[in-house]
Image (cartoon, grey):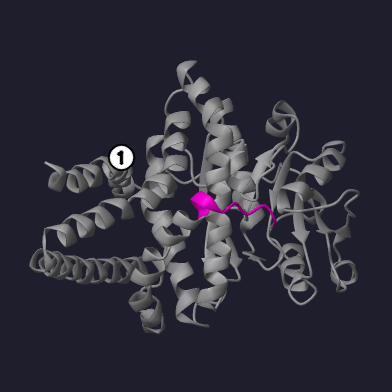
Amino acid sequence: MLSYFPAVLSILLNLLSVYFLAVALFAWKKPAPYPKAAPACRFAVVIPARNEEAVIGALVSSLNHQDYPNSLYDVFVVPNNCTDNTAGEARRCGANVISCRYPVRCKGDVLRQVFPMLLARDYHVFCVFDADNVADRSFLREMNNAFCAGALVAKGRIVAKNPYDSWVSACYDIYFGFFDLFFNQPRASCGLSAKLVGTGFAVHRSVLEELGGWNTRTVAEDAEFSAQCAAAGYRIAWVPNAVAYDEEPVSFLLSLTQRRRWCSGVMQTARKALPALRKALLNGRGLLALDFMLFLLMPFTRAFSLLPFALSVLFAALTGMAALFRLLGFLLAVTSLSYLATALLAACIVSVTRPGDLRMWRGILGFPLFMASWVPLQVVSLFCKTTVW
C-alpha cells in the first residue's frame, strides 16, 4: 500500500491546479472593452525609487507625455535609501520629489508614508510604477476609462522593456503574457480579480480611505494589498490597454534572487491574510475571497509537489536497483515531455503577444527551465523568510 502513497499525494496536491485550469478555460472569452470616457479622474502617479538615477528620467518623460490633460495628473518620485542622485534627476525631468520621513525596508514602507500626504489633496486615483518602467502614452487615458466605468482598483498590462537582452528577460515577457492570457483575461471575463503585480496599477481614493491608507508589511506589498481588497470585497479590474514596460533581469542568478523574494513575500502574505479571507468567505463575500485564498495556497502546494517524487525514489531504492532505474527512466521521459509541452506553450504565447517575432526563440527554449525553477524557490521560501526589498 505504501507504494501507492506518492501517487495519491501527488493527486491531492494537484487538485488546486484543476481549479486554476477550470478558470483559465474562460480565456477564450475576451472581456468587453471599457467605454471611452472624457478625462475626469485626477491622478497622482507615485514612483518609489532606490538608486534609480540612470532610469528614472525615461519613466518621468513617458508620464509627462501622456495622452491625457497635464492639469489632471501629477508625478511624484519618492527616493529612499539612495546613494546616487535619483532625487536630482527626477526634479530635472519635471517630477515632484517627496522624501521619506522614516526608515524604509521595502516598497510597502514607502507607500505607507506617502499616501497620507497625497490623500490630503484632491486626487481621485493613485497610480504606482516601478522606477525602471516606461508608461505607454495611453496609460492614464485607459485607466480613466476604467475608473469612469466603475473600477475602484485596476491593473494594467506588463510587457518586458528588454525582451531581447537575454533568454531570461525574454522568459519574463513570456511569463507576463502567460499570466495575462490564462489568469487575468479569464478572471476579467468571469467577474474575478486580476493579479495585482506591483507596478502599473491604480487605486481609487475611496478604497484607501476605507482600508485606512496603505497598510502592508511584507515584501510582497502587491499580494498583501490584493488580499486586503479581496477581504473587503473590492474587485481588481484588468485594463489590458494600459501598458507598462518593465525592465527585466538579464541574469538567471539575479532572476532567482528576485523571484525568491516574490515567493517569500507571497507565503508571508498567506500566513498573515488567510484568516481575514476565510472570515470574509464565511461572511458571504464570495468568490473574490475564495479565489485569492487559493492563489495564496498555490506556492505551498507547489513546494510540496516535490515530496511525491522524493518518496517514489525512496520506495524504488528500497525495492531494488532495477526498480530505481525503471523509475528514473520514467521520470526522465516525463521531464522530457514536460519540457517539450512547456516550450510549445511558450511558442503559442509568443505567437499571440509578439506574432512573427523570431527573436524570442531563446526565451521559448529557456521557458521550461524558468518555470521549473519556481519550485525550488518555493521550497527554500518555506524555511527562509525574506524581509528586505
Q: In the rendering, at what x and y percent does residue 8 appear?
A: 19, 42
- Which quadrant of the structure image shows residue 290? top left
Q: Which residues are magenta?
A: 381-388
Q: Residue at x 25, y 40 (%)?
A: 12
Closer to the camera in the image, 33 or 365: 365
Q: In the rendering, at what x and y percent does residue 213 appear?
A: 75, 34
| 256 lies above or below 12 | below
Q: Main secondary structure of the magenta part?
A: loop
Closer to the camera in the image, 100 or 76: 100
* Residues packed near mark 1 inside 10 Å, few (<14), some (14 to 19) or many (20 plus): few
Residue at the extreme top of the image, as rendered: 283
Residue indicated by mark 1: 19
Asked whether residue 357 appears in the rendered view, the answer is: no
Asked if the magenta segment contains residue 383, the reply would be yes
- Which quadrant of the structure image shows residue 271? top right
| 23 lies above or below 279 | below
**In the image, what residue type sits under mark 1?**
Tyr
| Quarter of the rendering occupied by the C terminus | bottom right
Q: Residue at x 44, y 71 (%)?
A: 171
Q: Residue at x 69, y 52 (%)?
A: 128
Asked if residue 346 lies left or right of residue 224, the reply is left
Asked if residue 178 lies left or right of residue 216, the reply is left
